[in-house]
Each structure stands twice: as structure tokens, then as C-alpha cells.
Image (cartoon, rainbow, N blue to C red):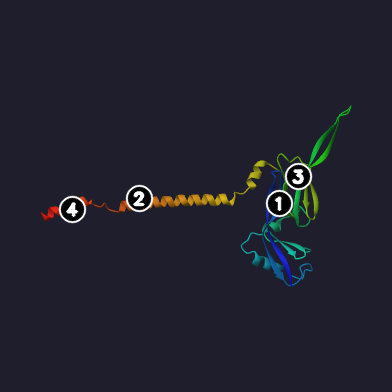
Amino acid sequence: MGEYLFKCLERLDKVFDGKVLLTVLKEVTSKTVRIRGDLDTNRIPESRIKRIITSSFSGTKCDYVLLLDSEGKTEILVPVSDTAVTARTVIFPRVAKLKGIQLLKKQERVELEANAVFSRSLINENVNVNDTYYVFEGRVGLVEPHNDAVAVRILTDKGTRVILNGEHIEKIKKESVELLKPQPLRQRTAVRKVTKRRGKAKKRTRRKRASSRRKPKRKSRTRRKRRTSKKKR
């Protein structure tokens, strides 16, 4: 009997620091599962692992599920959704935790001599990574005006990879970056609450008007008293 940590990962295209677009895997939720057998020796059938995944993460959006043992020696990435199965472009040979991103850019240096000599040297420009992500496959892009970089260096806990600009790096415009930003959930709920309140207020005013039209006008008490006094006379 072994304990394994199942991590539900969502695949998304993330723009870091407004400079680099990178497909990352973000952890949604995790669950510890006890299984008889050893995953490293492939004694557990794949169908059984798929059943455990569906029962553990029913109703949760998972593109990949990462299986980890207690010692951290075994790591198995299981594609679950259609987007994960059809993915082909590999960013890193095995799933790894993202540690940092760097842009490799050209820099002109002028040596003041009798004859001016121009030479170029690469500089590293760090890109902010503020959260925990995993990388495996997907897109790599450079956003304007940073798409003149020579290469993108991806730093992970399992090593480093340098992707050249002419390899499979996309050039992305600023307008397309805005489309990738989803509307925050808090703003959506706030808008819905406001519209609901306005709708309720309109219904109340309509009901009050309808009730006022239906009710007959009551006669004043002074008129009633005068009529009764005339009858007695």
C-alpha cells in the first residue's frame, strides 16, 4: 500500500510581465490517494488510474493530473482533457516546476578607438514569475515591443532550456494579449447582484401601483356621520 499525491492541473496561456507568453500548468486542487502497488514498476493498470482520477476530481476542470509518490522519486503526468491529449509542442522534455524566465537580448557596445568598432553581446532580462506553475508543452511567444529578443530562457527545477527566436516562438501583438485576460469573477458577481437588486426594486414599484389601482377609495368619516345624523332626524 503506497500513498500518492494526485495534483489536478489546469492548462492556460499566461502572459508574464507583459513580455512573454508561455503555456503553463497551474494547480487547481490536490488529493492524497492510497493505492496497492507501485507506480514506478507499472504494475498498476492505466484504466485503474483513470478511474481513481475521475472519482477524485469529479466536477473539477483538470487538463492534466500529476502523480507524485511520498518520496518524490516518481512523477507521472496523465493527460485528461482533449486539449491535453492533442497537444504536441513540447516546451520541456518532462513536467517541471517553473523557476524563472529570462529574455536574451542584443546589446550594442561602442569601443572608442581610432576606428570605431561595434560589437554585440547578449544581456539577460529577467521576467517576473509571481506564482507556482509547471511547464511541459504549449506555446511560447514574445509580446510587442519585446519580440526582438534573440531567445527565451526557461528555468525549472529540473534544468534550463533556451528556445531561439526562430525555433517556435510566436510574435504577439498587444491587442491579442488583452483578449487572453479573463474578466475577474468578483466583478461578474457584483454586476449580477446590482442587476438583481434593480429588478427587485422595479417589481416592488409595479406591485404598489397595481394594488393602489385595485383598491376602491374609502369615503371620509365626516360624510358618513352627516348622513347618519340626517336619517335620525
Mark 1, other Cα within 10 Å: few <14 / some 14–19 / many ≥20 = many
The residue under label 2 is which amino acid type?
Answer: Arg
Name the front one of labels 2 and 4: 4
Disc 2/disc 4 C-alpha distance (Å): 31 Å
Q: In the rendered structure, which disc, 3 or 4, sits on the residue that comes first in sequence?
A: 3
Mark 3, other Cα within 10 Å: few <14 / some 14–19 / many ≥20 = few
Q: In the rendered structure, which disc, 4 or 1, sits on the residue that comes first in sequence?
A: 1
Percent x, y of residue 38: 77, 70
Asked which secondary structure carries label 4, the reply is: helix
The residue under label 3 is which amino acid type?
Answer: Asn
Q: Which residue is mark 2?
A: 209
Name the front one of labels 2 and 3: 3
Disc 3/disc 4 C-alpha distance (Å): 93 Å
Q: Which residue is mark 3?
A: 126
User: 105 above or below 206?
Assistant: above
Q: Which residue is mark 1?
A: 23
Asked which secondary structure carries label 2, the reply is: helix
Percent x, y of residue 104: 79, 43
Name the front one of labels 3 and 4: 4
Disc 1/disc 2 C-alpha distance (Å): 57 Å
Q: Is residue 49 left or right of residue 211?
A: right
Disc 1/disc 3 C-alpha distance (Å): 18 Å
Q: Is residue 226 visible?
A: yes
Task: Name the residue at 38% across, 51% down.
Answer: 206
Q: Which residue is mark 4?
A: 225
